[in-house]
Amino acid sequence: MKHLIHTLNKAFDHRVRLGVMAVLMANDTVSFNDLKELLDLTDGNLASHVAALEKADYVLVSKQFIGKKPNTTYAATAAGKEAFRAHLAALEKLLSG
Amino acid sequence: MRPDFTATDPLAQLTEIRAIMERSSRFLSLSGLSGVGAGVVALAGAAVAHYYLQSHFADGYAYLLGGSRAERLAALPFLVLLAGTMAGAAVLVAWFFTRRRMQQQGSCQPLWNSLTRRLLVALALPLGAGGLFCLRLYLGDDAGLVVPGLLLFYGLALLNASKYTFTEIRWLGLTQMVLGLLATLQPAWGVLFFALGFGLGHIGYGLLMYARYERPGAAGATGQSQAAA
C-alpha cells in the first residue's frame, strides 16, 4: 500500500490542482474566469496553483486581449495529460488494492 | 469544490474528478420542461399551418406541394413568419425553464456562459445550413422534401449538440432523423410528420428528462453531477 501511494504524482497532491487538470482534460482551452467559477475559487488561490502546474510544464498559459480586456486561457500540455492519466490509473490501482 | 476529501481517499478523488470533468464540459441545467414547452409550441404551429393552408389552398399542404411555384411563393411569407415565431417562442420557453432550474440549483453562473455558447453554436451550425438548404428545396421543385430535410438537419444538430449537454439528447436526434427519412415516403403528410417530430418528440423527451432528473425525488434531482449513464 505504501509503495502504491508513492506512485501518485506530487504535482497533483492538492485538490485544486487536480480540479484544474480535470477541467483541462475535458476542455481544449478554458479561460481564467471560467476556471475560477467552475472550481469555486478566489483569484489568488487559482493563480498560485495554476502557476505550480505551469512550472511543471503541465499547463500552457496564453494571454490575449479581447478588445481592451486581458483574457488568459489555459490548456493542458501533452505531458500534463499523460501525467494526469497516469495519476488516475494510480488512483484506480489503489482502489483495486 | 466545497465538499472536502482527504488526499488519501482515492475513491473520493476519482468521483470528484469525474464530476468536475462532466460539469465543466456539458451544460446540465437544460430543463426537461424546456423540451415540453418547445413541443407545445411546435404542435400549435403545425395546427396554425394546417388550418391556414386549408383555407388558402384547396387541399392544404398536399395541394401546395403539387402547386405552382407562384403559389408556393405566395405562401412563403406566412411560412417564414410562422417558422420564425415558433423558433422565437421555443427559445423563449426553453430560456425561461432553464433559468428557473439554474436558480433552483443555486447556480451563480450566468445563463450565457461558455458552455451554453458552445451548445448553441453546435446546434446553430447544422440548423442554419439545413434551413437554407430547405428554403432552396422549397423554391425549387422539391417542396415535398422540406419537412424531411428539416427533421433530418435538426436531428443532426441534436446529435452534434449531445457532446455538450445530456447524452440522452442523442436519442431525440436519432428519432428526428428516422422520422425525417420516413417522411420522404409520404411527402403529403409533411405537417403530420412535423407535428410528430418537433411536437411529440420534444414533449416525450422533455417529460422523460423531467422524470429522470428534476422531479422531486428523482435520482439525479439533487446530485451535483448528473452523469448521464
Image: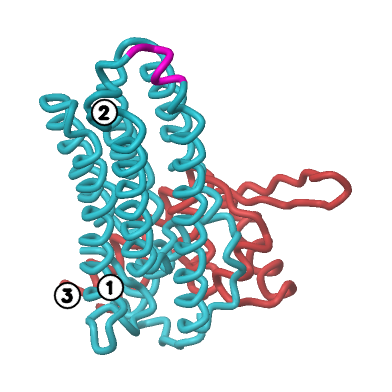
- How crowded pointer 1 is (Cα within 10 Å; few <14, some 14-19, many 20+) is rated as many
What colour scheme has been applied to the protein in the rendered image? by chain
Q: Which residue is mark 2?
A: B58
Chain A representation colour: red
> Subunit of mark 3?
A
Labels in figure, total: 3
Circle 3/circle 2 CB separation < 8 Å? no
- Identify which residue is drawn at 41% across, 65% down: B30
Q: Which residue is mark 3?
A: A97
> Subunit of mark 2?
B
From the top left corner, tell me how far across and down residue B17 is, in percent.
39, 68
Q: Is residue A16 magenta?
A: no
Q: Mark 3 or 1, which is nearer the eye?
A: 1
Q: Residue furthest right?
A: A68
Tell me which chain appears cyan.
Answer: B
Magenta residues, start to end: B68-73
